[in-house]
Amino acid sequence: MKHTQGPWKVEIHNSVTEVWNQNTYIASVRHDLFKTTEKSKQYESNARLIAAAPEMIELLIKVSSHIDEMYNLRNTDLDLQNEINLLIKKAKGV
């Protein structure tokens, strides 16, 4: 992959939410100074979604490589399902 390797993390400051990988700056999402506004919450959610991107692509690659197997199995792959659920929570900031 050509992107900066994950995991990426979110850092929230007064008027900007930044996305970093250790010491590498990835992106920033500017928002209102008042964190109680709905728009600021939306901007923070956008940054969390950006930060989850490397793990999302890695998980999609795993799912893609196992898709044939998944159709042939009757039982759910709980490890993969748990990984997906954790990633969704990260993207949502839960």
Image: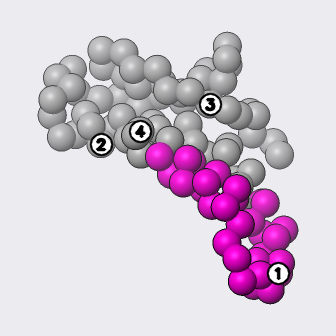
The numbered mark, 1 or 2, whose residue comes first in the sequence reads 2
Is disc 1 placed on a helix, strand or loop? helix
Distance from label 4 to label 1 (Cα)? 32 Å
Is residue 50 visible to the viewer in this orientation of the structure? Answer: no
Residue type at mark 3: give it: Trp
Distance from label 3 to label 4 (Cα)? 13 Å
Colour theme: one colour
Which residue bears the numbered disc 2? Answer: 42
Is disc 4 placed on a helix, strand or loop? loop
Q: Position of residue 22 (x, y in %)?
A: 67, 17
Q: Nearer the viewer, mark 2 or mark 4?
A: 4
Looking at the image, do the residues carrying marks 4 and 1 touch, with CB atoms under 8 Å apart?
no
Residue type at mark 1: give it: Asp
| Image mark for residue 93 | 4
Q: Position of residue 77 (x, y in %)?
A: 71, 66
| Image mark for residue 68 | 1
Above-or-below relation of 62 to 55: below
